[in-house]
Amino acid sequence: MRIFNIRNEDEFNHICLDVFKLQFNTVPVYHDFVSALNSNPDKITNYKDIPFLPVEFFKSHTVIEDLAFADVVFSSSGTTGTQTSKHYVQDAQVYEDSYLNGFEHFYGDVKDICILALLPSYLEREGSSLIYMVEDLVKKSGHPESGFFLHNHSDLFETLAILKAKSQKTLLIGVTYALLDFIEKYPIHFPDLLVMETGGMKGKRKEMVREELHQTLCKGFDVNKIHSEYGMTELLSQAYSKGDGIFECPPWMKVVTRDTNDPLSILENGKTGGINVIDLANVHSCSFIATQDLGKTYPNGTFEVLGRFDNSDIRGCNLMVG
């Protein structure tokens, strides 16, 4: 796909406009949303002016091309009784290409890395796009020690000790609370380990501010930085942080921030607002999504996640949701 060959801002903008017009014409819910805003696709010349679909639509509507059959359906986690998001993915190969290209863009050849996963809350439910991705990366890494750990922390500790002794490049990706649970019983000295948290306490522990969380994890693993992954059910691409909570997108993904009081207005760099994501891998659903996350962008294209909206009723953004 040409999105994986984007080299500069002009190419990104050009492909965005093509994808926008395609999705306006082929994704019924997006067509209705854009039309309700009286937005004319022919008059939009910059990706920042493309209307961003509120992420809640993935809870209330089927966001997919007309008459398309879904290869796979990803669903978000949700508490009992709440509506979950569903992402109908027409072509699973696009997702696989996106996460592999994205991962290798930041971390190099997956075959050089032993990948360990500590993702209990994701493993214990169906439809997780994160599990789909990590299972495939584990398989592609080809290392005999690569794999998943549920609650068997002693096994994980022994595996890490073996990998450290071998000086094997190793990535441990884990849900936040599980990483904290692990180091409480099994602190380890492994300075070269890549520790990546995927965010979220999942109701298992008290929420912590990022600085405190990363400081605790750095101490427990004896590493200098904690990496993070930014992804969601509604996206087919991921942004990564190699420390300090500053995320970078692969070339086919971009983040801009919107004014929380005027959601159709895009903010300048450095100002806190709602995170809008452009994910060109979402070519068969919707590539332009207004999330419920708060953050700020920086001139070099990086961004920071500062929290979430207090409730799902985002002011001015609920047109047609329901």
Image (cartoon, rainbow, N blue to C red):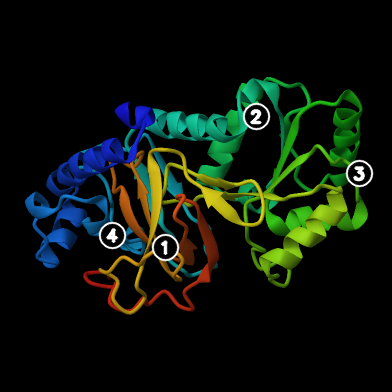
Amino acid marked by disc 2 = Val
The residue at which mark 3 appears reads as: 189
Amino acid marked by disc 3 = His
The reply to whether the C-beta atoms of the residues labelled 1 and 3 are less than 8 Å apart is no
Position of 73 with respect to 243 (left or right) is left
Of the image marks 4 and 1, the number of the one nearer the N terminus: 4
Of the image marks 1 and 3, the number of the one nearer the N terminus: 3
The residue drawn where x is 91% and y is 36% is 158
Quadrant in the rendering for residue 107: top right
Q: Could you tell me how far apart the alpha carbons at marks 2 and 4 are, in whole angstroms?
A: 33 Å
Position of 271 with respect to 126 (left or right) is left
The reply to whether the C-beta atoms of the residues labelled 2 and 3 are less than 8 Å apart is no
Amino acid marked by disc 1 = Asn
The residue at which mark 1 appears reads as: 269
Q: Could you tell me how far apart the alpha carbons at marks 4 and 1 are, in whole angstroms?
A: 21 Å
SS label for mark 1: loop
The residue at which mark 4 appears reads as: 53
The residue drawn where x is 62% and y is 25% is 110
Q: Is residue 230 visible?
A: no
Q: Could you say where residue 248 lies in the image, as x and y percent from the top left?
A: 51, 47
Q: Would you place residue 109 above or below residue 284 in this image?
A: above
Mark 3 is surrounded, within 10 Å at the Cα level, by few (under 14), some (14 to 19) or many (20 or more) other residues, namely: some
Identify the mark at residue 298; answer none if there is no mark: none
Q: Could you tell me how far apart the alpha carbons at marks 3 and 4 are, in whole angstroms?
A: 45 Å
The residue at which mark 2 appears reads as: 138
Q: How many marks?
A: 4
The reply to whether the C-beta atoms of the residues labelled 4 and 1 are less than 8 Å apart is no
